[in-house]
Image: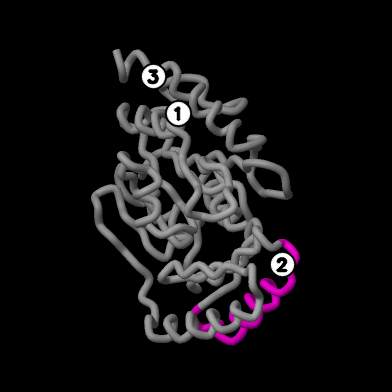
Amino acid sequence: MNGQCPPSAQDLQNCAFFFDVDGTLAEIQPRPELVFIPPATLAALDRLQAVGVPIAVISGRRLADLDRLFEPLRLPAAGVHGAERRAADGRLRRLDLDLEALRQIEDELVQACARHPGLRLENKGLAFALHFRLAPELEEAARTLAEDFSRRHARLLTLQPGKCVFELKPRGASKGEVIREFMHEPPFSGRVPVFIGDDLTDEAGFQTVNALGGHSFKVGPGETIAQRRLDSVMAVEKWLDELVRPLKTEVYP
């Protein structure tokens, strides 16, 4: 590859694509439930699949939420930063976690967040997110809470900062590791990985893809180990359109 996309259909057929969602394929919204995938982006992903190019979604969201976002597509996917994963053949894998301990942590977090109106707690089942996008003045309070919980429950959880959010994700969940797992399985194995993401949690994915000789793209500003950069979600949509444009007549005559 050179520039921003594969120069030929032959190169495209040798690739496997991995995408983050919020801030990459979809604009970040005030609340997670307001996020949507643009129709043009869904169409581009559909075209890639139609010509046999493997695609997987790697996100902090739950698998069930990802399936709703990408309807009617049902893609191989990793949710909660890799804590749960659906392989291309439909097999499901989840980290083995102490669910009773997670329920107790949730109860503690609910009580703690109640002291900070405007701080939104999202329970992802296997992880927790403290959102302060609608109350940016609560950033330090959210950070302090997240750091405290990650220290007290270090056996189970680790702190993952993000854009207007602090997440407590399962220890052992990593976008980098889950990409590596996909790359050991068909139809991804033997291909060149391409990963596009925008946030701190995506850096582990960039690291893995770089080590595998693939191509990493950071969306938006900020320090990164990604090799290349796309300016915005809109730029990603345009990039995908240019990527699949030579395939349009082949897929949809």
What SS does tag 1 mark? helix
Q: Which mark is residue 40?
A: 1
Q: Amino acid at mark 2?
A: Glu
Q: Closer to the observer: label 3 or label 2?
A: 2
- Cα gap from disc 3 to disc 1, whole angstroms: 14 Å
Over which residues does the magenta segment extend? Answer: 136-156
Describe the colour scheme in one phrase.
one colour
Query: Which residue is found at the position 42% from the left and 65% from the top?
Result: 83
Q: Residues within 10 Å of mark 3 (few under 14, many from 20)?
A: some
Q: Which residue is mark 3?
A: 247
What SS does tag 2 mark? helix
Q: Is residue 173 above or below residue 12?
A: below
Q: In the depicted view, which residue is nearer to us: 114 or 145? A: 114
What SS does tag 3 mark? helix
- Cα gap from disc 2 to disc 1, whole angstroms: 34 Å
223 on left or right of 152: right
Q: Earlier in the sequence, mark 3 or mark 1?
A: 1
**Whole-percent x, y for residue 36 in the image:** 47, 43
Magenta stretch holds residue 155:
yes
Magenta stretch holds residue 119:
no
**Whole-percent x, y for residue 253 in the image:** 29, 12
Q: Which residue is mark 2?
A: 139
Q: Is residue 153 above or below residue 14?
A: below
* Residue farthest toward the front in the current orientation of the protein: 117
Query: Which residue is found at the position 56% from the left and 74% from the top?
Result: 158
Question: Split into 4 quadrants, where in the image is the N terminus?
Answer: top right
**Whole-percent x, y for residue 52 in the image:** 31, 31
Q: In the depicted view, which residue is nearer to us: 119 or 236? A: 119
130 on left or right of 60: right
Q: Amino acid at mark 1?
A: Ala
Q: Is residue 216 above or below residue 139?
A: above
Query: Which residue is found at the position 69% from the left and 72% from the top?
Result: 143
